[in-house]
Amino acid sequence: MPSIRKCAKCGLDLSGTSAAVCPMCSAPIAASIGSKVWIGGLIQFALSTGFMLAFGFPKVMIGIFGAVILVGTAISSRAKVRKISSRPVPQRPVSHPVGLRIVSVAILLCGFAFVCFLLFGFVIFMNAQTRWHQYDGQRYERTDFVVTRVFYQKLSRGGRDVYASGTVNEHKEWMNLAPYLQEDNQTVPRTEGEVDERVPTGTSIPIYFFPDLKGRARVQVYNDTPPAQAYRRTAMEALKGGLLGVGICGGLMFILIRLRSLCFENSTVAAAPNDLPVGQIG
């Protein structure tokens, strides 16, 4: 059975018209609802993109996340327009408008946090898992990296690449200095001169050396936990933290949606005496 489109304000049958406003009362017909959904999607994309750029996420991930937001917004907009267009009766009156606004904003924030936990937890998990399998089962030895020169390069996405050339067992190697500098609990260097001051030529850095790997992956800063175990731990923590955050946000959204329904009047309107059948008027 086809649905009947009615104006939410005056109740006029709109099944035979494609106008953007009601011919009777000039009320907008569902178009404003769709535009609000797209504005919300644009705001969500802007906030997420800014966050990902600030933390140096790859542009591919930003594109994937943007596509997900685009598809989700399109589906949400279509669903809302169809729901409003086929609604036969006006919306229920609001009994607590201030509370409705507060709860609606809280639902929006929880939804944004839900997406962030899902996306960033997945990215961190996949990155750590990839590195974990890269080092898992590889032979390594405990030795030292002797610095011969440091390099500092600003990246286009706002990050910094700090690395060094040096020798390991009298053979030239390359090393990423970021993990070593982070162990000092100091501020991130902003110039190559500052890096050279903190890591002068001849500095000996304890490392794990992986002779079967290539590039900077061959040299990893030494700590009590070997790289494979450390990345495995990071992957498991990201998985647990992401699932916990998604679960908490989902539970909060469910509770807030139930609270939102309490902001509407739930009483039914009794029939007027003139609407009673003949013979039943007292």
Image (tube, helix red, strand yellow):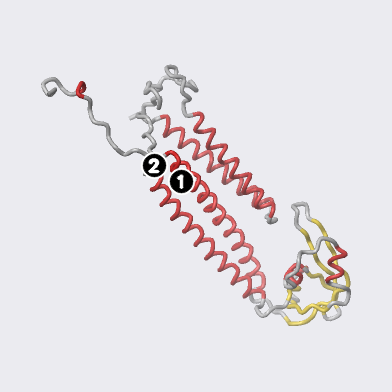
Identify the mark at residue 103; answer none if there is no mark.
1
What's the amino acid at mark 1?
A: Val
- Asked which secondary structure carries label 1, the reply is helix
Q: In which quarter of the image is residue 45?
A: top right
The x and y percentages for residue 185 are 73, 70
Q: In which quarter of the image is the N terminus?
A: top left
Q: In this view, does 211 lie above or below 176?
A: below
Q: Is residue 68 left or right of residue 95?
A: right
Q: Which residue, as the protein is rendered here, is positioned at the far top?
A: 24
Q: In which quarter of the image is residue 191?
A: bottom right
Q: Quadrant of the C terminus?
A: top left
What's the amino acid at mark 2?
A: Cys
**Which residue position holds label 2?**
263
The x and y percentages for residue 94 are 39, 36
The x and y percentages for residue 116 are 57, 54
The x and y percentages for residue 140 are 71, 79
Identify the mark at residue 139; answer none if there is no mark.
none
Bin the neighbour count of mark 2 within 10 Å (Cα to Cα): few under 14, some 14-19, many 20 and up. Answer: some
- Asked which secondary structure carries label 2, the reply is loop
Q: Is residue 32 left or right of residue 2?
A: right
